Amino acid sequence: MTDHLFVYGTLRTGLDHPQARWLAANSSLLGICTIQGRLFRISWYPGLVSSGLGNNDRVIGELLRLHDPKVALRKLDDYEGVSEGDYERRIVEVNLKGRHYSAWVYQFLGPTEGLRWIPSGDFVRDLNIHFD
């Protein structure tokens, strides 16, 4: 188990969302980093999918240290729809300024056909460009 969490969407620091505010109060921001994957616009929120080893796709997000991982992950599992099968929580390797961390991430499990790909891999940047 790890107390680190990689967030890439509505949970990112500074976004005006109740869950993002709750998470900010219950974690410490370690920094901006990337992981391998592709980011798609599901609706008003994004979904990260694996892009396969050797692929250069990157998703930009933040590495957080959870103050109480058991409480936080239980709350976040509900928010992310883990029990409904929308997302899966898994551990990935994150590189932050040359240092490697194991971190939880929520990966989208649904089909991506027909969804808009976010080529920058940055949901916050995409919000400033697309207001759909």
Image (tube, helix red, strand yellow):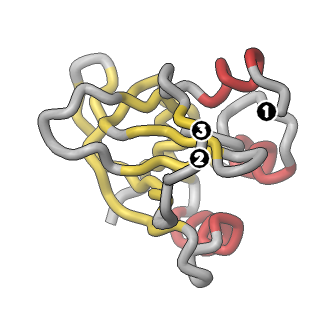
Q: Are marks 2 and 3 in contact (CB under 8 Å)?
A: yes
Residue 54: percent from left, percent from top:
13, 34
Q: Quadrant of residue 15?
A: top right
Q: Amino acid at mark 2?
A: Leu
Q: Residue at x 24, y 26 (%)?
A: 56
For numbered disc 2, what is the local secondary structure? loop
- Residue 80 is left or right of residue 87, and the answer is right
Q: Are marks 1 and 3 in contact (CB under 8 Å)?
A: no
From the image, which quarter does the N terminus lie in? bottom left
Residue 128: percent from left, percent from top:
76, 17
Tell me the number on the disc at residue 115.
Answer: 2
Give the mark nearer the N terminus: 1 vs 3: 1
Residue 25: percent from left, percent from top:
74, 45
Q: Alpha-carbon neighbours of circle 2 within 10 Å: few (<14), some, or many (≥20)?
A: some
For numbered disc 3, what is the local secondary structure? strand
User: Mark 2 or mark 1, which is nearer to you?
Assistant: 2
Q: Amino acid at mark 1?
A: Leu
Residue 19: percent from left, percent from top:
78, 53
In the image, 129 versus 125, the foreground residue is 129
Q: Residue furthest bottom?
A: 83
Q: Where does label 1 land, which residue?
A: 15
In the image, 73 versus 124, the foreground residue is 124
Q: Quadrant of residue 95?
A: top left
From the image, which quarter does the C terminus lie in? top right
47 w.r.t. 119: above or below? below
